[in-house]
Image (cartoon, rainbow, N blue to C red):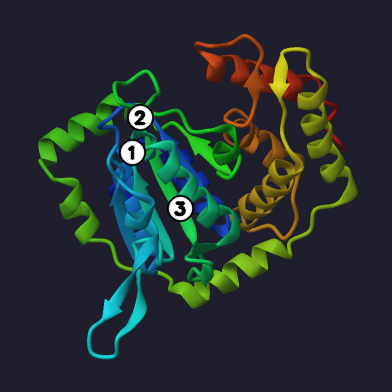
Amino acid sequence: RVLSVVRGNPGAVRLSLATILARGHLLLEDVPGVGKTTLARALARVLGVAFSRVQFTADLLPSDLVGVPILDPREGVLRFKKGPLFANVVLADEINRASPKTQSALLEAMADRSVSVDDTTHELPRPFHVLATQNPVEHHGAYPLPESQLDRFLVCLSLGYPPAADERALLIENRTSEGGLASLTPLLDAERLAAAQAHVAALTLNDAVAGYLFAIVEGTRRHPDVELPCSPRGSLAWAGLCRARAFLDGRAFVIPDDVKATAHAVLCHRLGVRGAVHHSRKRAAAIVDELVAHTAVPR
């Protein structure tokens, strides 16, 4: 159903859904106008869970995300007014336009599924997912996300431009993204989504396939051009994504193709490449290709 709104990239839609099933956060990175926000909103609508959208700007404060204590005049006590982070799916639109201080507030929520205000910890709803969009750092007004926050995103995707035939069809239909989103109906709810996630987490990942995945991860730690390799958190999250892909394929077990098909989406944004100030993501992709090509596939 999401494909009826987001044209021309079924692979990205499928991988986005797998990220949610794997209990991960998703980063959509591309130039403006290619459908990043539309994809995030369509996923939230189909999942049928509590949804909020935050437009990140340079003047956005952490309290605008988390919430603030407000005095109740009738009872004379402070009550916590929840911010937009208190939803199952939070769309963080143009996340790299906010200041590092505001980005760090989101980091805590992504890491702990909770927020702290005035020495009090508030649990966020479960499931909790951040679907963030960002424009390339080269665009004016963008603040690069720190490595610690990039590692919190299970998957980073670039949508690219739709195929010519799909873009022409959009011109002929003259349909706005809002109209397409309005036609989507929820297929799940929070309880059923949590149950699906638990089922995915229980799928089989045997020793051979786990060894194959780890060999690629270990390769990032030995490669001479990699300054910041994949972390243990990254490898654990990758295994979860492979399980989710197996689930979407109707399998109860992970195969090496699940590892290969998801390597770029999991690894490229995590790798820090030595001396690559510009085009570091392209160099990271080349390194991932090299590691996958030179790692023995289990039979």
Percent of width and height locating residue 96: 39, 34
Find numbered disc 1 in the image and state the secondary structure of the residue it sits on.
loop
Disc 3 versus disc 1: distance between alpha carbons? 12 Å
Nearest the eye: 79 or 161:
79
Q: Which of the numbered marks, if any, corresponds to residue 130?
A: 3
Crowding at dot 1, Cα within 10 Å, few <14 / some 14-19 / many 20+, comes out as many
User: Which quadrant would the C terminus be assigned to in this image?
Assistant: top right
Does residue 237 appear in this view?
Answer: yes
Residue contact between numbered discs 2 and 1, judged by CB atoms under 8 Å: yes
Which residue occupies the extreme bottom position in the image?
75
Q: Which of the numbered marks, if any, corresponds to residue 94?
A: 1
Left of 120 or right of it: where is 174?
left
Disc 2 versus disc 1: distance between alpha carbons? 6 Å
Left of 257 or right of it: where is 108?
left
Mark found first going from the N terminus, 2 or 1: 1
Find numbered disc 3 in the image and state the secondary structure of the residue it sits on.
strand
